[in-house]
Image (tube, rainbow, N blue to C red):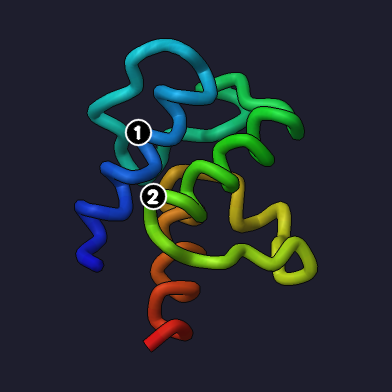
């Protein structure tokens, strides 16, 4: 999956979780500070991403650094997608 498609999946998941339109994300957008996510909304977003991207996210492999920005989250998802091949 191309990085653009991953970002679009993240935007769709965030739109669902935050119940407002989220688009035009750049790699440096901070998930907690800029988008105001909390631990509950992160879990909801991850469940949505699992469904939409057909990946399994293991909570044991999660690191807070993966949730710093949209860029770090998409890099994490790209790694997951690469492992599934």
Q: Is residue 31 above or below residue 35?
A: below
- Please state, as top left, top right, bottom left or bottom right, where the N terminus lies in the image: bottom left
Label 2 crowding class (10 Å Cα cut-off): few <14, some 14-19, many 20+? few
Residue 32 numbered tag: none
Q: Which residue is mark 1?
A: 12
Q: Is residue 68 above or below residue 79?
A: above
Q: Residue 54 falls in which quadrant of the image? A: bottom left
Q: Are marks 2 and 1 in contact (CB under 8 Å)?
A: yes
Q: Which residue is mark 2?
A: 52
Q: Residue 28 falls in which quadrant of the image? A: top left
Q: In this image, 44 relative to 20: left or right?
A: right
Answer with mark 2 or mark 1, whichever residue precedes in sequence: 1
Residue 29 on image: x %, y %: 43, 34
Residue 21 on image: x %, y %: 33, 15
Label 1 crowding class (10 Å Cα cut-off): few <14, some 14-19, many 20+? some
Residue at x 61% of width, y 63% of height:
57
Mark in front: 2 vs 1: 2
Q: CA distance from mark 2 to mark 1?
A: 9 Å
The secondary structure type at the circle numbered 2 is helix
The secondary structure type at the circle numbered 1 is helix
Residue 83 on image: x %, y %: 47, 85
Number of numbered discs: 2
Residue 36 on image: x %, y %: 60, 20
């Amino acid at each position: 999956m191309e990085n653009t498609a991953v970002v679009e999946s993240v935007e769709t998941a965030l739109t669902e979780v935050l119940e407002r339109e989220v688009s035009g994300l750049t790699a440096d957008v901070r998930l907690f500070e800029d988008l105001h996510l909390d631990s509950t909304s992160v879990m909801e977003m991850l469940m949505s991403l699992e469904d939409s991207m057909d990946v399994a996210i293991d909570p044991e492999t999660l690191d807070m650094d993966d949730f710093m920005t949209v860029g770090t989250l998409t890099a994490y998802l790209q790694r997951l997608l690469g492992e599934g091949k």
